[in-house]
Image (tube, rainbow, N blue to C red):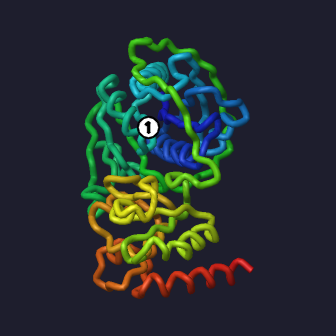
Amino acid sequence: MSVLVYTENWDGKFKKLSYELVSYAAGVAKMTGTSVTAVSIGRVDEPELRKLGDYGASKIVSLTNDNLVNLDSQAYASAIAEVAGKEGSKVIVIANNNTGKAVAPRLSVRLKAGVGSGVSKLPVNLSPFTVYKRTYSGNAFAHLVIKSDVKILTLSQNSFDLVPASNTATIENLSVNIDGSLVKTTVTNVEKQTGKMLLTDADIVVSGGRGMKSPDNWSPLVELADLLGGATACSRPVSDEGWRPHGEHTGQTGKIIAPNLYVAVGISGATQHLAGISSSKYIVAINTDKDAPIFEAAQYGIVGDAIKVLPKLVEAVKELKK
């Protein structure tokens, strides 16, 4: 019996999110007196697979099948369910990202498992099995009791610190049987963004709202993001006005992100926006309105005109980087 964790890879490489998931699974395994089995789907080189052992995986199952070449949530759920059955896993950990949100419900049906979505801490109790999660767009917290025999937990990004381990993991290459009729996804074309950090991968995000007043005022914001090694984002009104690309829109109807640092410049903090960024570890707000809702979510705030404050922040960062 083991805690099973699905570790997504990108072109054969793991990212911080994958190691965060393994660290979390190792924490659950310690509580339940079991071990961690990590599942990797697709072609990943052995040295890369072994990195999962550095964060607590004692066994790594590498799955390959022609029907698993492209992400298809039904096929992936079938494969993970098969491994869970072989390992006798009662707890399965998946990321609370787009992939996890597609796979977890299908896996739940296959395994008759309850789902704790968007958890951000280790279980607070094992009997009954109780998990901690944000609710109401991050405005409240809840203790969720899962009564099913098998439990599926989707972990919010950046909610659990990496915990290095010294496991020498064993690797098992497994070819699973996937019913071809399950595969409904066909990839006809792939366009990869180059020369720019993906918003969902960024540890630091500098985001602007209508308080920036005009698209002509955006250069200091972009410069600050570049100096910090981060990505740029915006609120929905900004993207709707065409000031910034729709791909930068964060919020309930845009990209949901969880960076280590989110700098909200000229953003009031509407509920829809906060729903997309509330899982950020630290939020810094800059706004002229001291009563703006964004200050309730922020750990640090500056009451002032973003157009005047940004250049000073840029100069301060430049000075620190000398």
Residue at x 37%, y 53% (from the top left corner):
254
Residue 256 makes an appearance in the image: yes
Between residues 113 and 9, which one lies in front from this camera angle? 9
Quadrant of the rendered image containing residue 258: bottom left
User: Which residue is located at x 37 percent, y 39 percent?
Assistant: 101
Q: Can you give x and y, in whole percent of width and height, for residue 306 in the image?
A: 45, 82
Q: Residues within 10 Å of mark 1 (few under 14, many from 20)?
A: some
Where is residue 260 shown, x and y percent of the image?
Answer: 51, 63
* Residue 209 found in image quarter: bottom left
Q: Residue at x 30, y 26 (%)?
A: 109
Secondary structure under tag 1 reads helix
Q: Nearer the viewer, residue 143 or 158?
A: 158
Spot occupied by residue 216 in the image (x, y as percentages of width and height): 49, 74
User: In the image, what residue type sits under mark 1?
Assistant: Thr
Instruction: Give x and y (percent) for residue 197.
Output: 59, 55
Q: Residue at x 66, y 28 (%)?
A: 170
Relative to 251, say whether 310 is above or below.
below
Residue named by callout 1: 99
Considering only vertical position in the picture, is 39 above or below 297?
above
Q: Quadrant of the C terminus?
A: bottom right
Describe residue 143's horizontal placement relative to residue 169 as left or right.
left
